Image (cartoon, helix red, strand yellow):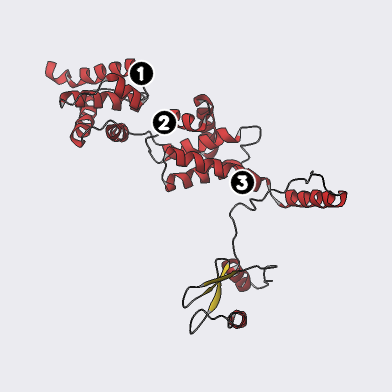
Amino acid sequence: MDSERKQHNKMYDEEPCCDNPDIQPWRGYYVCKNCGVVFDQVFEEAPRRAFTPQEIEQRRQTEPVYGTHGSRTVISKFDKDVSAELKQKFRRLSKIHRSTTSTFERNMSIAQPKLLGYAAALGLPKTITDEALRIYEKVVTKKLTMGRSINNLIAGSIYAAIRLNDIPRTVEEISEVTQINEKLITKAYRLILSELNLAPKSTSISRFISRYGEDLGLSAAVQVRANQMIEKAKANGMQTLGKDPKGLAAAALYLAAKEANTPKSQAMISNVCKISEVTLRNRAKEIKKFLEMNKNE
């Protein structure tokens, strides 16, 4: 390494970047350690040979990594109006490229940009996006994509990451972004849960109250009152298991806003929360019934 560094320093002595240049390879480029000037790109013809365990470990730490899922370049057959000799060369290059790229890399090169695009459209944080990507990598590793739609499994992986981290996003929203039927997303999601042995959390009603309260422009006091209504109704015996948390959150916000003299119309709440007005009225009656239970007693 010292001889290589001296060679690089000598190479750039003609146009020195500073008084004491120290040129070293860093992240695929030659960079001066003292002043930070970036020079040419590093091109390695072949990795260094390693024999002892120490040399192998050193090579793992120093050799450049250009991508996590292999090459993104796709070399296809050259079918334009050119000479037969050039066509033959491109066909041979395409064949070599296909043979050196694994099925996992080919799948991920297609799926990863789609997954990142869907996650960005849904406004998911980076931690959730990374979790969805890890889940999909496990799906590909277990060969669950054989005979199944990649897009469906991508959507299912995103929904699994959302449920595992208790994020207030619904299947309807994922379906709207991915243009995939909700039943197909749910089917892929259940397959992923059973094959990967995942245990998702049930999204809490309070998370939906916070989200929809902000979307409706309701104050923090109204959101707190909506949470209090849900907790009191549950304490009085209201069952929430198996019920859509969106409907309960919407109904609690509707009642709390009405109580605070800042009412929102049923049509507006139904539109924001993506539920029907019938569901909103039924859940509101149910919550009101359990809230008045102690008064009647």
> Please, what is the three-letter code of the amino acid marked with disc 3?
Ser
Quadrant in the picture for the C terminus: top left
> Does the rendering let one see residue 58?
yes
Residue nearer the viewer, 94 or 151: 94
Residue that badge 1 annotates = 276
Q: Is 162 on the left-hand or right-hand side of 254?
A: right
Of circles 1 and 2, which is in front? 1
At 51% from the left and 41% from the top, the residue drawn is: 117
Which of the two discs, 2 and 3, labels the residue nearer the N terminus?
A: 3
Query: What is the CA distance from the residue labelled 1 to the residue labelled 2?
Result: 15 Å
Which of the two discs, 1 and 2, labels the residue nearer the N terminus?
A: 2
> Please, what is the three-letter code of the amino acid marked with disc 2?
Thr
Location of residue 257 with respect to 135 vertically, above or below: above
Residue 234 in the image: x percent, y percent?
A: 25, 26
At 40% from the left and 41% from the top, the residue drawn is: 165
Please say if the residues under marks 2 and 3 sit with CB atoms less than 8 Å apart.
no
What secondary structure is found at the residue carrying circle 2? loop
Residue 293 in the image: x percent, y percent?
A: 17, 18
What secondary structure is found at the residue carrying circle 1? loop
> Please, what is the three-letter code of the amino acid marked with disc 1?
Ser
At 50% from the left and 28% from the top, the residue drawn is: 186
Q: Residue furthest front?
A: 81
Residue that badge 3 annotates = 109
Query: What is the CA distance from the residue labelled 2 to the residue labelled 3?
Result: 27 Å
Residue nearer the viewer, 106 or 76: 76
Residue that badge 2 annotates = 170
Residue 225 in the image: x percent, y percent?
A: 19, 31
